[in-house]
Structure formats: C-alpha cells, structure tokens
Amino acid sequence: MNKLSFWTKIFYGYGNVGNAVKTVVFSTFLFFYYNQILGLSGKMCGTALLIALCFDAINDPLIGIWSDKMYSKKWGKRLPLMLVGGLPFAISLFFLFIPPDGLSEMWLFSWFIFFAVFTRTTQTFFQIPYLSLGAELTDDYAERSELFSYVQFFGFVGNVSVAGAGFVFFFHSTPEYQNGMLNEGMYPWFGLYASILILLSTYGSIFGARKAILERTNSGTITTFEGNFYKNIKDVINNKSFRNIIIGLSILMIVNATGEILSTYLFIHFWGFKPENIVLYLAFPFFIGLGIALWISPKTVKWFDKKYTLIYSNLAVWIITTILIGLKLLNIIPDTEIAYIITLMVGVGLINIFAPLILITINSIFADIADEVKYESASQKTGTLFSIRALLSKIATGIGSFFAGFLLDAIQFPENAEMGSVAESVTYNLGVVAGPLLAVIGLIPIIFFLRYKIDRRRFEEIRKGIRKQER
C-alpha cells in the first residue's frame, strides 16, 4: 500500500473525538451527576454501569463479526455500520442528562441503566468498524503507530473539548455554588453540547475519510456471520499475542476507569481546586506532554519496538502518579496553592507524555495482532478482534466504575460535598486509594505485556505469509 495522505490521517483521527467525549462524560461527569446530584449511592451508580456491560457481551461480538462480513456497493466495508451508529449514539447520551423529575430511586436507577445500555450499543456500531479500519488502512509496521497517534491526538482533543468546557463554562464556581459541579441546572445543557461534539466527529470522519477508506477496503461480497460466530471468536481468543495483551489491557482499564472517576473528587477535595481552575492550571502541561508524546511516538517504535514502549510507558505513569500524590500525603509539598499548582503542572505534564504512548502503542499492537490472526486462520477477523477488545475494555471500565463506587463508599465520602467540608481523614484516604493503591494494581499488566512476542521481524514474517495467501 502507498502511504496515507495527511488529510486521510486527520479525518480518520477526528473520528475518535466522539469516543473520547463519551468516555470522559461517563467517567468524569455522569457518575458524579447521578451520585452527587441525583442521590444514587456509589454502589448503585457503579452497578448500573456494570449491568449495562452485560448487554455488550452480546452486542459487541455480533457487531464485530457483522462488520467483517457486511459489504455495500456504495459504502464498502465498515462505513455502513458507522453511518447507522452516529445519530442514535449522540441522542442516547443526551437523554442520560434529562431524567424526568420525581423519579423514585429504582426508576432513576432503571433510567440510568436503559440509556447507558443504548449509548454503549450505538457507540459500538461506530467504534468497532472505526478501530478495525485502522488496521486495514495501512499495512506498514511504523505507519500504524503514526496513524494511531492521530487517533490519540483527537482523543485528547475530545477529552479537553468536553472536560475543559464542562469545568470552565458549564460548572464554574458561582456565589450559589462554590463547587460548580453541584449546579444541577447545567447538566442538560452540558449533555446537549457533548452530543453535538459526537455528531460532528462521527459524520465528519466518515465523509472526510470516505474516499481513502473505499479505495483500500472496496472488495468483498455481502455475507452473514451465520455459522461462523463461535469459530471467529475462538480463532481470535486462541491467539497467544491477543490473550496476553488483552489481559494486561483489561487490568489497566479497570485501574484507569477507577482513577478517572476518582480524579474529579481528587482535584476538588484532595488538592482543593475549583472546577474551572482544573483546566486553567493543567491545560498547558497537558498539551505540552501530549505534543511530546505525539512527536516521539514513531521514534519509540524504532528505539524500543512496540512491546517495550508499552512497558516503559506504563511503568513511568504509575511511578509518577505515586510520587505526585505521595508528596502531598507525606506533607512534603508546602501547604500553599502555588506549591500545589506547580507540583500538579509538572506531574500532569510528565504523565501526559507517557499515558498517550500507552494508548497509541496498544492500538498499533492490536492492528499487528489482527494480521497475525488473519495469517493463522487464513481469513480476516479484524472486526471480531476489535469487538472482543471493545467488549473486554467496556467490562473492565464497568468493573472500574463499580470499584470506584465501592472505594468512595468504603472511605465514607459524603454526598453533595462542598469544597472544604470533607473531613481531613476522608480526603487523606481518598489520596491513598487514588494513588499508591491504584499504582500497585496498575503495574500488574507488565507481567502480561512481557509475554507479547510480535516484533518487527515477526511482523514481516506475518505480512509475507498473508501476501502468499492472497495470491
């Protein structure tokens, strides 16, 4: 294949904005909204998200196999499902923020579950074909990392677009609400804003990258997955590379989801920042770190290969996180706002060099594993692979949400907590569970990443074998 054009990479990467928006909404705002504003317990919020994932156990593999087999003369592969998913994905997310007034606890719990299920399902219609395309648009070992660096860049654009607007414009402090996150009236408007971002991202990516996608995937016939469902899944799961990476990633996603939910509580109550100041102080180091990550990402493939880029980056994130929170827990940082700001700016800048490298490398590795599965089974199962990856990632995220709720209840974190009103012992325990505890768990994936065997040499063997199969 020829190299991808710059604009193809841009439009393809832009599609990840919507996925990132949904992730931030669920982890940072939605849990907080139902827990602190609407009054559902942490355990009920976590359970609602966990129940929603049970439906993904059916939806994700079916949509993945359907994505592999479906073909349209006009839209080729992958794109038809992406077209179907965009609009309902945006609408269902909006409905999560407009539950009717006066609902009982159980009806509110049911509303949360229903629209969480619908949001996740419709997102899957877009996300799985979208990620599968990343493996099919290029078969170059290094260019895959470069392509997914664009995906990661726009993922962080999505993060900042929704988190930044949320903290600065929708939930800033007011005379009535010192903690602007407690301003219930702004949540429907915030939900509408997030939904518009999803619509622009999904359809902007589809129509912007459509020509290149059709040129590189325009082959096949319309078939169904009937009779191939279990074999397709078995072929993917039997791959040793896939098993090791997916187990490590699942553990990492559990810890990440837990940390993302706790981070809102951490910034406001542990570090003592108003919501709007979180963005004000941290946006600059955030983008500096991201810029460095995107610049060095293609280079790390040459320096360390993908396996050790993943391992070293994961190790760095948890060491920095532990040091960052540990400095405050041990009262090493002076108890002044400027000291906290400088410490966080340095820490966040460093973390955002290595955290994006993890995600860029993981996506590139899954594209390589898709080739290995194709070579070993003599048939394409890219959609199936990414559907299993998406399902297990969602399950891990659900477990992380439940775990975060459990931890908040365990440390007896109060509802509707204003800044400065939480007991010092509770905020201390919050720092312990969000820092050292999660870091210890976050290092476990390295055991599985060490067992991954696809390097550049193995990749070239796989591509050579695929070319022979296609003759």
Image (spheres, grey):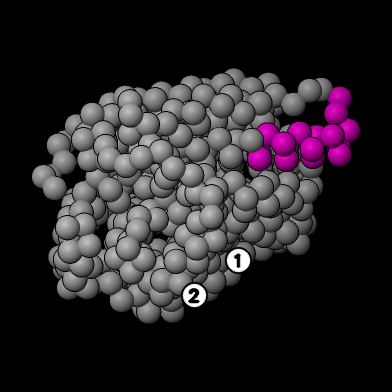
Question: Marks 2 and 1, how far apart in space?
Answer: 18 Å
Q: Residue furthest left?
A: 2
Q: Position of residue 277 (x, y in %)?
A: 48, 36
> Would residue 111 appear left or right of 236 to someone viewing this image?
right
Q: Which residue is mark 2?
A: 444
Secondary structure of residue under mark 2: loop
Q: Position of residue 284 (x, y in %)?
A: 33, 41
Dot 1, how many residues are within 10 Å of its Cα: few (below 14), some (14-19), or many (20+)?
some
For residue 432, the mark is 1
For residue 376, the mark is none
> In the image shown, does 139 or 229 lie closer to the viewer?
229
Find out whether residue 114 is within the magenta segment: yes
Against 437, residue 401 (above or below) is above
Q: Position of residue 91 (x, y in %)?
A: 58, 24
Instruction: Look at label 2 and name its amino acid.
Output: Ile
Find out whether residue 393 is within the magenta segment: no
> Would residue 461 appear left or right of 53 to someone viewing this image?
left
What residue sits 62% from the left and 50% below the top?
58
**Tag nearer the camera, 2 or 1:** 2
